[in-house]
Amino acid sequence: MTDNSTLKVDRPLLTLAIPTYNRSTYLRQLLENLEVPLRGELRVELIVSDNCSSDDTPALVAEFQARGMRIHSIRNAVNIGADGNFVQCYEAARGKYFWIIGDDDLLAPGAMSSILDRIQAEEYDIIYLSQFPIKEPVGELEHQQIRNAVEIRSAEEFARRIHVFFTFISANIVNKDTIMRSHPKPFKDLTGSLLVQLGWTFAALDGFKRGLLVYDPLLGARDNIAGGYQLFDVFGPRLKAVAEDRISSLKVRRAIFNGTLRHYLPLFAVKYRRARIPFREDCTPQERLTPAFRDFLSYWVFLYPVLTLPLLLAIAWYLPLHLWDRSTARFMRWRSA
């Protein structure tokens, strides 16, 4: 592994880390997206961690470094896996705040300066960023700043609103000081779970005193539901196991589980069934999910019928519950504004 850091000794306010592997086309778009907002920005440490790409990623990083972009470049001699690369980014980060952004994501113009000004002025344990969909080809992005956001001082309330989306790495900025005060278990223990990022995110949640939920769409994300029904396992039993291992509060854990069962997995199940992708022959989603969530009313009301009813009935069951949930979310957002 080689390290081409040319950073200042002083601790940055924010480390922005980009783990990447064989996606130089996306990485170029992201680095071009960050080039202007990071120009002369000494509050930010930028890391690109290349997991032994076989494409032109090394030359691309060198190109941007030659253009004056301050990149702490890490290139692994062998591929250490996605989870290992994420942990490596965390361990290399020197900033007070740590933010991994996917190499295929983008920031809205104005987002970076707005985030930096907010975290410099205020102290947060976790900041969650709302997203907008990236359309291809990528055109000019709309300028965004933090104008519509709510501060939350209850870990249970924060978990109720974010739930499964703690797993979306690019959307969560965490305070490393909070994490260290939580004395977390080694993050490497979660390698292979596909949820290693929850090691530091749940540690920040366990030490939570104050969070920021940003409604303004600062982060552009590409729609990607690759993984098929494996996602029912990752966002079902695996998520439950990691939360039970890493979050001390039962109320916070249940807020995450109920939100996932109500707001995320039913929508995914409807989309997947409409695509007519067959269930795995060895194990249906309900066979994986029922042992983990049999004690949750939200599982039986919101998710189980969508998985087991004939498709048209499943959609008819899902839609009114989904519309009711959206109306409730809008009311909660209005009430906290």
Image (cartoon, grey):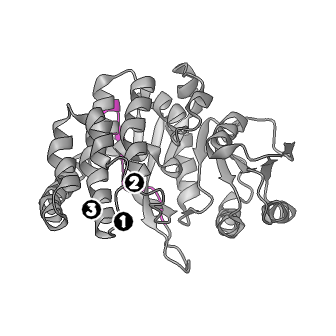
Count of labels shown? 3
Q: 202 and 209: which one is in front?
A: 202
From this viewpoint, is residue 207 visible? no
Q: Residue at x 84, y 42 (%)?
A: 1
Residue appearing at x 81%, y 44% in the figure: 7
Q: With 227 as the anchor, is 264 left or right in this view?
A: left
Query: Where does label 1 land, which residue?
Result: 277
Within 10 angstroms of label 1, few (less than 14), some, or many (20 or more) residues? few
What residue is shown with label 2?
229
Using the image as rendered, state which of residue 86 and residue 237 is in the foreground: 237
Residue at the spot x=67%, y=50% of the render?
19
**For the residue labelled by badge 2, is the local secondary structure a helix, a strand or a loop?**
loop
Q: Is residue 322 left or right of residue 32?
A: left
In the image, the segment drawn in magenta is 144-158
Q: Give the label, 2 or 3, closer to the camera.
A: 2
Q: Earlier in the sequence, mark 2 or mark 1?
A: 2
